[in-house]
Image: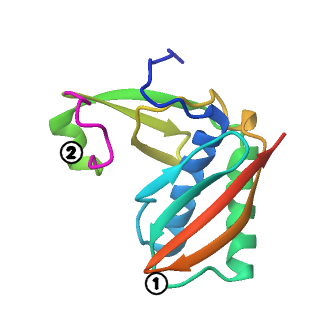
Amino acid sequence: MNEVKSNKDYNPEMHSAEHILNQTMVRMFNKGRSFSNHIEKKKSKCDYHFDRNLTVEEVEIINKKVNEVIQQDLPVTEEFLHRDEAINKFKLSQLPDDAGDTIRIIKIGDCDACPCSGVHVESTKQIGAFQIISTSYENKVLRVRFKLQK
């Protein structure tokens, strides 16, 4: 995969795991991707517009589903779309204002595709084991904190 210079200094493993977590949340709850996140090497968090906290069982299912995707050793690739085409397929509101007319789409196998300017792994097997370490719910926001283990 060609490396693209990024404005974000995210950890590639964590950032790639965040994509898989987001797609898992969309598929399970149909409430959209995280509207805010903070990605760091030791632990990260994603915030979702939600109506409650997750149950213990839901956390276990999310962990299982994310790790199943990681273990599939899916390629992480990029493609570039003109903004006019990308806007019809993706939500572009979280891209930086200076993203330009060419939008970079990150694809994780057939699991996920979304606009992104961050740095990623080349294959999901490089991510390591995903684990939600806590969740909280306040003011209609669900916060999911997670870490990775090699």
Q: Amino acid at mark 2?
A: Ile
Q: Is residue 3 above or below residue 82?
A: above
Q: Secondary structure at mark 2?
A: helix
Q: Residue at x 47, y 32 (%)?
A: 118
Q: Which dot marks residue 66?
A: none
Image quarter for residue 41?
A: top right
User: Dot 1 corresponds to which residue?
Assistant: 51
Q: Position of residue 89 (x, y in %)?
A: 27, 48
Which SS does the magenta portion mostly show? loop
Q: What SS does tag 1 mark? A: loop
Please state the extent of the stretch shown in magenta in the rendering: 92-100
In the picture, measured across the screen, residue 26 lies left or right of residue 145, that is left
Give the amino acid at mark 1. Asp
Q: Residue at x 78, y 41 (%)?
A: 128
- Vertical order, 2 against 38 (above or below): above
First along the sequence among labels 2 and 1: 1
Q: What residue is disc 2 on? A: 87
Residue at screen point 68% across, 38% down: 124
Quarter containing the N terminus = top right
On the rendered structure, is 68 left or right of 122? right
Q: Toward the viewer: 50 or 76?
A: 50
Q: Is residue 69 left or right of residue 95?
A: right
Figure label count = 2
